[in-house]
Image (cartoon, rainbow, N blue to C red):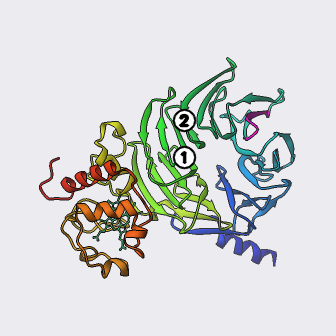
């Protein structure tokens, strides 16, 4: 029986590069995922537990008295056993679970939202809504708390002595531990939920959908903000220079950080949030978790490739303020689903090439909703203006196009002017 079980577990094994995998067993949403260097997946759940997955049957790590929001691996014993994690959650506790020494490292006065291990592993940082960052020494020196200007949603180390934190009132803070210095780097205005920090750049994701890459002084490197909010998960794989972004609408976007282009973009779940993201050790699989109690392993190579909206040269990298408003509207709100060039495209929507004067729902080869197929009007300045004044759900009820209103009449006019020149053959480059 034992041999059979082992064989089954091996077959069910953790994802190889080409398979789609689901990890089932949690009794609540998955709030965070961490992957160890050996590929072991740790899932933190609303069901108060952490699952450690080497196959289809996890080891359950219990101890928290409320939802677990954050998990990081601390490693394994020399023989590969005794693997454990640090975890934290709605019970205000920071714990080590599994391994030879499960214990409570300490407690906050509010829920704990994120954890980060310093490079080298000497220090664990915890982000809490009590307005502090806990610093838990793993080498014997006393623990400490850093004050933040608001509840803390995210924390990440740049080096053993420098860390960044994102707060619920939209401040990105930098802490220099040797100089005991705290500096606000960015005032985003909306809560910062997620952070990735490397030696070269900082990526943050915010409640308003803001997805920005900045340098250490807060200067913008790139802006990937779309009309999707909030940003709930970020994951980075340095060797393959992939940055994954998960949002409240169920999308996962993968950015190539070598050239700051969107490499892939896909709808991971039909309904609702992507709370958790983590790459496999080789960067070939992205693990994602959300509302439906299951962690998914998606082979990155099988995800929808993203085609740049206008031509290979243009991208979101161009500073938003150097782009004319109409183009910016298109890049942010439409380009993810619509091409502007003739011919078939793999995007969710039909190409908008030649859309002015085209009868609605009439592009050959595109599979429209029933609503658009039987529509009896032509796309013009006036009809496209009405489409986004009222929103597709009111203007063409039953359409596959997502709800979206562009409130500003100027923004709509600029968008239409841009579309007019960008969707015709003799457009100016
Ligand atoms: C998340 C994807 C998505 C986004 C974002 C999106 N669209 Fe669409 N759009 C679609 C889909 C899907 C359809 C086809 C709808 C159907 O068949 O009901 C469509 C249809 C259309 C059509 C009708 C085309 C035709 O041939 O009948 C127009 C015009 C259009 N979109 C314009 C826009 C503009 C302008 C924006 C940005 C402000 C935008 N869309 C944003 C997915 C999207």
Q: Position of residue 90 (x, y in %)?
A: 78, 50
Name the quadrant where ligand 1 sits.
bottom left
Which element carries disc 1, helix, strand or loop?
strand
In the rendered structure, the answer to whether residue 234 lies left or right of residue 362 reads right
Say which label, 1 or 2, has the lower sequence index: 2
- Pick the quarter of the image with the N terminus: bottom right
Please determine whether, in this image, residue 253 is positioned above or below residue 13: above
Q: Position of residue 254 (x, y in %)?
A: 47, 53
Camera-side residue of 87 and 36 = 87
In the rendered structure, the answer to whether residue 254 lies left or right of residue 184 reads left
Please determine whether, in this image, residue 84 is positioned above or below residue 369: above
Which residue in the structure is indicated by mark 1? 236
Q: Position of residue 106 (x, y in %)?
A: 85, 39
Residue at screen point 71% across, 74% down: 7
Camera-side residue of 133 and 179 = 133
The image quarter containing residue 258 is top left
CB within 8 Å, label 1 to label 2 = yes
In the rendered structure, the answer to whether residue 319 lies left or right of residue 60 reads left
Badge 2: how crowded within 10 Å, few (<14), some, or many (20+)? some
**134 falls in the magenta region:** yes
Which element carries disc 2, helix, strand or loop?
loop
Residue at screen point 24% across, 77% down: 364
Please determine whether, in this image, residue 117 is positioned above or below residue 401: above
Residue at screen point 69% across, 23% down: 177
The segment highlighted magenta reads 129-138
Camera-side residue of 339 and 82 = 339
Please determine whether, in this image, residue 93 is positioned above or below residue 268: above
Tell me, for residue 198, which label it has, or none. Answer: 2
Decide whether the magenta segment is chiefly helix, strand or loop.
strand
The image quarter containing residue 2 is bottom right
């Amino acid at each position: 029986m034992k041999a059979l079980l082992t064989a089954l577990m091996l077959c069910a094994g953790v994802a190889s590069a080409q398979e789609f995998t689901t990890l089932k067993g949690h009794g609540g949403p998955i709030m965070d995922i961490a992957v160890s260097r050996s590929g072991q997946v740790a899932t933190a759940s609303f069901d108060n537990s952490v699952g450690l997955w080497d196959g289809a049957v996890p080891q359950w790590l219990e101890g928290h008295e409320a939802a677990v929001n954050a998990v990081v691996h601390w490693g394994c014993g020399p023989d590969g056993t005794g693997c454990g994690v640090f975890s934290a959650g709605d019970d205000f506790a920071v714990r080590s679970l599994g391994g030879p020494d499960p214990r409570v490292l300490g407690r906050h006065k509010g829920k704990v939202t994120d954890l980060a291990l310093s490079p080298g592993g000497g220090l664990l940082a915890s982000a809490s809504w009590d307005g502090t960052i806990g610093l838990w020494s793993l080498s014997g020196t006393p623990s400490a708390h850093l004050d933040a200007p608001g509840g803390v949603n995210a924390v990440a180390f740049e080096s053993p002595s420098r860390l960044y934190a994102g707060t619920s009132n939209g401040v990105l803070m930098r802490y220099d531990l040797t100089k005991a210095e705290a500096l606000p780097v960015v005032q985003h205005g909306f809560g910062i939920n997620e952070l990735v920090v490397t030696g070269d750049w900082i990526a943050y994701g915010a409640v308003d959908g803001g997805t920005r890459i900045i340098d250490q002084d807060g200067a913008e490197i790139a802006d990937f903000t779309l009309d999707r909010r909030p940003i709930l998960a970020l994951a980075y794989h340095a060797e393959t220079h992939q940055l994954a972004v998960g949002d409240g609408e169920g999308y996962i976007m993968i950015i190539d950080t070598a050239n700051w282009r969107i490499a892939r973009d896909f709808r991971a779940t039909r309904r609702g949030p992507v709370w958790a993201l983590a790459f496999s050790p080789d960067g070939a699989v992205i693990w994602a978790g959300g509302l439906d109690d299951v962690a998914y392993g998606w082979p990155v190579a099988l995800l929808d490739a993203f085609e740049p909206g206008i031509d290979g040269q243009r991208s979101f990298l161009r500073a938003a303020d150097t782009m004319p408003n109409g183009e910016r509207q298109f890049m942010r709100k439409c380009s993810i689903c619509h091409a502007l060039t003739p011919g078939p495209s793999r995007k969710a929507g039909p190409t908008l090439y030649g859309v002015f004067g085209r009868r609605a729902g009439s592009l050959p080869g595109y599979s429209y909703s029933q609503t658009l197929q039987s529509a009896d009007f032509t796309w013009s300045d006036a009809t496209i203006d009405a489409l986004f004044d009222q929103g597709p759900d009111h203007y063409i009820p039953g359409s596959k196009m997502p709800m979206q209103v562009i409130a500003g009449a100027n923004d709509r006019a600029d968008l239409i002017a841009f579309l007019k020149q960008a969707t015709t053959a003799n457009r100016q480059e």
